[in-house]
Image: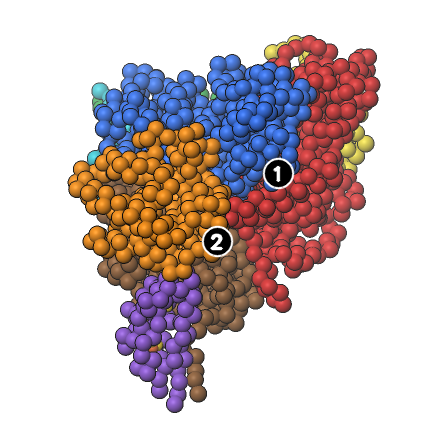
Chain colours: A purple, B green, C red, D blue, E cyan, F brown, G yellow, H orange
Amino acid sequence: MAGKVTFREERCKGCALCVEACPKGIIQLSKRFNAGGFNPAECVNEEACIACGFCARMCPDAVIEVHRVDR
Amino acid sequence: MAGKVTFREERCKGCALCVEACPKGIIQLSKRFNAGGFNPAECVNEEACIACGFCARMCPDAVIEVHRVDR
Amino acid sequence: MSEPKLMKGNEAIAEAAIQAGCRYFFGYPITPQNELPEYMARRLPEVGGVYLQAESEVSAINMVYGAAGAGGRVMTSSSSPGISLMQEGISYLAGAELPCVLVNIVRGGPGLGGIHAAQSDYFQATKGGGHGDYRLLVLAPGSVQETVDLLQEAFDLADKYRNPVMLLGDAVLGQMMEAVRLPRDLDEPLPPPPPPESKVWATTGAVNRSRNVINSLYIEPERLEKHNWHIQEKYRRMEAEEVRYEAVQVDDAGTVVVAYGTTARIARTAVDEARRQGLKAGLFRPISLYPFPYQALREAAGRARRVLVVEMSCGQMLDDVRLAVGERCPVEFYGRPGGNIPTPQEVLDRIAGKGGEAK
Amino acid sequence: MSEPKLMKGNEAIAEAAIQAGCRYFFGYPITPQNELPEYMARRLPEVGGVYLQAESEVSAINMVYGAAGAGGRVMTSSSSPGISLMQEGISYLAGAELPCVLVNIVRGGPGLGGIHAAQSDYFQATKGGGHGDYRLLVLAPGSVQETVDLLQEAFDLADKYRNPVMLLGDAVLGQMMEAVRLPRDLDEPLPPPPPPESKVWATTGAVNRSRNVINSLYIEPERLEKHNWHIQEKYRRMEAEEVRYEAVQVDDAGTVVVAYGTTARIARTAVDEARRQGLKAGLFRPISLYPFPYQALREAAGRARRVLVVEMSCGQMLDDVRLAVGERCPVEFYGRPGGNIPTPQEVLDRIAGKGGEAK
Amino acid sequence: MTTVVAQRPKSLSDVVMNYCPGCTHGIIHRLVAEAIDALDARERTIGVASVGCSVFAYNYFECDMQQASHGRAPAVATGIKRVLPDRLVFTYQGDGDLASIGAAEIVHAAARGENITVIFVNNANYGMTGGQMAPTTLLGQKTTTTPLGRDPKTDGFPIRMAEMLATLQGPAYIARVSVHSPQAVKQAGDAIKKAFRLQAEGKGFTLIEVLSTCPTNWGLAPNQALKWLVENLIPFYPLGEFKKEEGGA
Amino acid sequence: MTTVVAQRPKSLSDVVMNYCPGCTHGIIHRLVAEAIDALDARERTIGVASVGCSVFAYNYFECDMQQASHGRAPAVATGIKRVLPDRLVFTYQGDGDLASIGAAEIVHAAARGENITVIFVNNANYGMTGGQMAPTTLLGQKTTTTPLGRDPKTDGFPIRMAEMLATLQGPAYIARVSVHSPQAVKQAGDAIKKAFRLQAEGKGFTLIEVLSTCPTNWGLAPNQALKWLVENLIPFYPLGEFKKEEGGA
Amino acid sequence: MRHEVIMAGFGGQGMMLAGQLLAYAGMLEGKYVSWYPSYGPEMRGGTANCTVVVADEPVASPVVSRASAVIAMNRPSLERFEGTLAPGGVLVYNSTLIEQGPTRTDIKAVPVPANALADELGDKRVANMVVLGALLAVTGVAKPESVVASLRKTLPERRQNLIPLNEQALAKGAEAAQGAAAKA
Amino acid sequence: MRHEVIMAGFGGQGMMLAGQLLAYAGMLEGKYVSWYPSYGPEMRGGTANCTVVVADEPVASPVVSRASAVIAMNRPSLERFEGTLAPGGVLVYNSTLIEQGPTRTDIKAVPVPANALADELGDKRVANMVVLGALLAVTGVAKPESVVASLRKTLPERRQNLIPLNEQALAKGAEAAQGAAAKA
Ligand SMILES: Cc1ncc(C[n+]2csc(CCOP(=O)(O)OP(=O)(O)O)c2C)c(N)n1
Ligand SMILES: Cc1ncc(C[n+]2csc(CCOP(=O)(O)OP(=O)(O)O)c2C)c(N)n1
Ligand code: SF4
Ligand code: SF4
Ligand code: SF4
Ligand code: SF4
Ligand code: SF4
Ligand code: SF4
Ligand SMILES: [Mg+2]
Ligand SMILES: [Mg+2]
């Protein structure tokens, strides 16, 4: 069982609440700027994702979608 | 020890709350009408008054003054 | 039409509103209009409606906002201080374009003032006591019967323009009993009013349509300006289509008395008496205070020697009369503020050129 | 006089009020005037005054009532929706004849509207948005400096007439920084304001005198009427003594532009430019909106070919201008409601006879 | 030798009060005046009359008085107190005034611990305007706007203000008393005196809720009204002290 | 095979919300939308936006919406509910809106047992207008109108609304939750769902107080703001259920 | 024809209702009518009064400053309204409660022992109809039959049985008035 | 002479303060000046901007629809205000954060790596002074000395020590602008 986590990057405000929430520590803010002028969050190691959904739960802007991939 | 109870009759509205309050049952509404058109209260047996002040305490219109007479 | 009944103005208003389809009433007690909500409290549940005593006038007007936005035919009533408290809410209703009927049974002011009849809320009603560029459509009946007659119209106009309509009465109209004929007898069954969903813009639930929003906020000045001109366009239409007045013997009148509501009844008697005494007087009675009958009054004044404005106030409609009359003839004023009702004799004296501006 | 400082309008108002002896401020936050209460919150405790954030505007105006009645030099400020909520309280203040200063930093309406500058509360301010026959003395400064200059006067006039005085600004005046000279530098010590007891009618405790009562209730119509005429008499005095305006190049003007506050600044630039282009334009700027400078404007209009009213509204002062001008010459209007500020070019176009009534 | 047992307090003006015969508003007025006299504070007391049957209270107390708009007496009192912190300031408010239109003002004056005394006269209806439902009207009670009796489904539940306000930190003293008997009147007077005393000591917000009658609108003779109060109001509005000398200080 | 763990709820409009980065208003919006979805009630829900940072909520919920004047959302919701008793009606209000200017409206909607759901977002200040003191501001907390920190002597004490309203008979359910962690968010969501469900069952007034952050006006980074909430707000505003399914029915 | 009648007494003495019946009667006779109550805090003092206008022409103001007739059911009412009577006006007063009649001499005073007569009829509550009967007899504002017709229209079914009693009261009042007038 | 400058960036990038200093400087030079902020919910998006007018004649409106110069500290600001520049106007933009410059060709674009230069000076916070220096150099709205004088008047005692740093930042911005201008 693993997770698939997708970000609607243009909606991200770079608040980093997801970063803090991830028990696996696999989310970071990228150095890129999105259209809003923010550094959007991204998952740097999706392999490690356990699909706990914590990141999505803490995201104030509904940027994140989490799927459980049952392999 | 006895009481002296005086009524400012023209202020009385004849509500009879003093009548009800008197433990000695010595207050009545008179048959007279005062200027306000009410039957004013009066003490019909001042001798029996014990100066408890209950009548004055219950009077909404501050009609009654009670004195204790120490004879 | 019902057979004539002797009814108190406040109660007649309530019954006429119900017969006009009003099913929701939110209000707060205040003298001299209490019989109106009390009647509603008895009668609305009988016809499947809702009476709710709000915790304040501020709350009442916002309940009206919610109910109007939800598509209900809704009304509130109050008297001067209570209407002042509603000013923010009234501005919101106008801004969000919500239809409703507001009744002000005016009493003497300012402040706590008194509880007797006055007409000193004219400015507030007609110029907008709340903030922003908006208007109420203001109707001022002169008798209990006319009040009843105007109510169906008031609700329909509110819907037509999606704007609050105010019925401006006073303590005399509210408290007096007069003979009145209602559209229906009290025991006749009433047809059910149209369902909320019949107002397609109302927030009744987004079933098979995109969502509806009731709102008066336009954060971009451009949008807000556009919205403002859109609302103004409605007011221009009202000015073209909704002017109402009565003119009695003004064609050959040397003195045209201008008065509305209760004062007009008194002026009418004075004018009749003046005619009897050979004085050529006439009565011009605005029924819609906004839109004000400028044009008709201008014409009437054009033929007159002078215009006499009579109000139970220190002079408020006076401004509108002056705007209408311009310099066609002098405009004089007789006012009784604070709950005193002018007598026909007082008005007659002024018609005859006796007595001063005020008592 | 302080040396010139760059100050935000809202803060300059607050400081000027304090320098004018104001020691009590009750208010509730609302954009675009928040810097005013925030300044008061910082500064009043330093000078022994009281800043209190009320739970609402309704409460704030009633705290003002209590403080004014107790003899305090007191003020509140808000913006349009908040001022609407104060209407009952304002009517009470006028009815009970209490002196205080009310600041309205007007924003776009109606309803929640917007937060940008507008002038659409003119009717509410000048005709009385509350119930009953009362007036506020309304001052409309055109710059931050003038705002500061008018404040001492505002408090003094309030005391002189025992009537609330309203300072009618707008978001531009409140939010902008301009160079301003205050009566005193910020670090200069302030003289203590006169004690509450110096107002002999105030409820400061009935020591060696019969008790004082602050009240607006007169249950007998006769008493209430008398009270009303008494108040009116004050307004007649204001109309005689307190009219303020500025007239620039109106003597030979073909087009007299009438504008107040922020709009007048813009009109001034447009008028100057028009002169440069050979168009004979002038500016008439009412400073006191109530009492309105009818007479002076009438005279100015008597010499002009036309009058052009410019407002950040759909046309409210327009009525007063029409009352003043009568049929001396045509009155035209250019309005930008909802937070858009007209540009000098737009006004110039209308002076030159181009463009329509609104954008 | 005679000693005075009861007489008109100095702080009660020597005028006829316009209350209906037997209305206990009059008793409560006297108790307030006695409390002011007890502190010898008539000259440094400012009272605030509200809108209700007691609107003319500004004529009945022999101290400086202000008349406040409906429901806003606590705000008016706050304005006064902030200008004159060393004076005693009290409001006299009905249940419609305090618990309905003035709910925000009383909650916030209490939360602020505003150093004033509130006399809250609960007669379970709007007396002045002819007997409409008040927030304090009991379930089932008939009023002119609950002609079939108050129904919680449409008209909501009555509010126990003393209990509600006692959850706040600001109040120093909150009590509910009644005036249905000489004993009750004595206790009510003591509570009111205590409230004024605490204010004088700067302890913060004090409120005394007084259960009162409205013979006219209840449609009962004055003595019957007292009985109705005892049998109906007290069970729902228990007497007692709900908050004592904390907060505020 | 993949299963959805988290995605944008249907009842949340697909638009950018104007909240500051990291402001938890957004989380609370999502929870409300999820609660509506859980009842499959988008088409029969009417929401009421109040005045505060969440004023644009009328653009963020994909159901019919009304925008109410400052503090009056409970009155507006009452008006809606009385016309449409079989719809779900909720308000979304800040602490300035609900506890300050709207104190009377919330007390009375609660006392009436009005069958609506109130989402009460407590961020201990006025976010929208730039961070002034709110009734919920903690003692000592600095805001733009308490520059030296809130002082009870002049500024009064903070109000615990959930506790205060729980003294009333009308409410069916009152709870306080927080959104400082994924676990807290889960509990908050459950409480909100419960409130909507009770409304659907006609149980009466329900209110969920949600402790929320205001990174901008608190002057803290979003994660620091969550920490401040845990360390300062929760101790004064304990989480829990204060009223459960009585009254109102 | 224009009658302007003020009817005053304690709350509970039935003056408001009597006034309404009088107005109703006028309406049934095809007249213009109005009824106007006193209201508000002045009631707190315990008196209640109303003004009834019955006229051939539309009623301008239902509030009058000079009355053509006054009914006073108690002393405070007499004191308050005696002065508002036009010269030559009619004052019907309840002589059971008011021992001393009016001081004015330019009016027509009609003492009617209303409570006593009502007691004779066995129902205290009809004292109001007694004075109304007296008023009708002296002034002719409306016919007693019209008042009875009004009662028929306005009383609920279950109280229609009270009509004969009220009729008697009206008659008794008329009688008393004629007696008083004869004496005067 | 009339300069109408819009200065925009994220909240925290110091544009509001820089605008105030510019207005103050103009005032010290005897000009008519105004400063006007953006305010309200638009701030919630995270951008903050203000408008400064410095002119020889009284300022009519402190709000301008066409700017003579714009400072854009980040991309959203550039996008929002590029269009408001009058033809021939000056656009100073923070090239550290804005990779792609303006699309318009009828204006004078002045890229200034403000954050980078501020870093060079050892204090991120002076990026605002860097762009202000650039603006002054290109437009001559006010003299840098006047800005420094303004700092002297407005900074509290304990922060007067920051003045040299700010002076350097102004100079560095001017330099960068001249370089950019040379390149263009
Ligand atoms: C703004 C406003 N709304 C309504 C009123 C009318 N009004 C006067 S007194 C009153 C209620 C009084 O009830 P309560 O406070 O319980 O006092 P009581 O008369 O019972 O002693 C109302 C609604 C008013 N004067 N002002
Ligand atoms: C009548 C009125 N008063 C004041 C305002 C200004 N105002 C807008 S939002 C707000 C406070 C918002 O604070 P809160 O309710 O706590 O919401 P937050 O922004 O913190 O989420 C105020 C006072 C207004 N719009 N209307
Ligand atoms: S679902 Fe859980 S593990 Fe995966 S990225 Fe999100 S928080 Fe991290
Ligand atoms: S929580 Fe959401 S908005 Fe914040 S950084 Fe993560 S994805 Fe972006
Ligand atoms: S003092 Fe006591 S005993 Fe005497 S009359 Fe009064 S109640 Fe009766
Ligand atoms: S209690 Fe007072 S008013 Fe009532 S009857 Fe006795 S003396 Fe008279
Ligand atoms: S109406 Fe009720 S509360 Fe008012 S004075 Fe009469 S009895 Fe007392
Ligand atoms: S100001 Fe505060 S509450 Fe408002 S959106 Fe920003 S962070 Fe959220
Ligand atoms: Mg009461
Ligand atoms: Mg908040």
Residue B1 vs residue D17, the one in the foreground:
D17
Estimate how packed mark 1 is, as few (under 14), some (14 to 19) or many (20 or more) residues with alpha carbons within 10 Å: some
Q: Residue at x 26, y 45 (%)?
A: H171
Q: Residue at x 52, y 20 (%)?
A: D248
Q: Residue at x 36, y 75 (%)?
A: A53
Numbered circle sitting on residue D358: 1
Most distant residue in the bottom direction: A71
Q: Amino acid at mark 1?
A: Ala
Q: Amino acid at mark 2?
A: Arg
Check disc 1 and report its element: helix, strand or loop. loop
Q: Quadrant of residue A27?
A: bottom left
> Residue A66, position in %: x, y?
40, 77
Q: Is residue F93 left or right of residue C275?
A: left
Q: Is mark 1 within 8 Å of ligand 2?
A: no
Q: Residue at x 54, y 19 (%)?
A: D249
Chain name for mark 2: H
Real-space Cα separation, disc 1 to disc 2, in angstroms: 31 Å
Quadrant where the N terminus of chain H lies? top left
Report the residue marked by disc 2. H104
Residue B30 vs residue A35, the one in the foreground:
A35
Chain name for mark 1: D
Tell us which disc is closer to us: 1 or 2: 2
Q: Are marks 1 and 2 on the same chain?
A: no
Residue E28 visible to the viewer: no
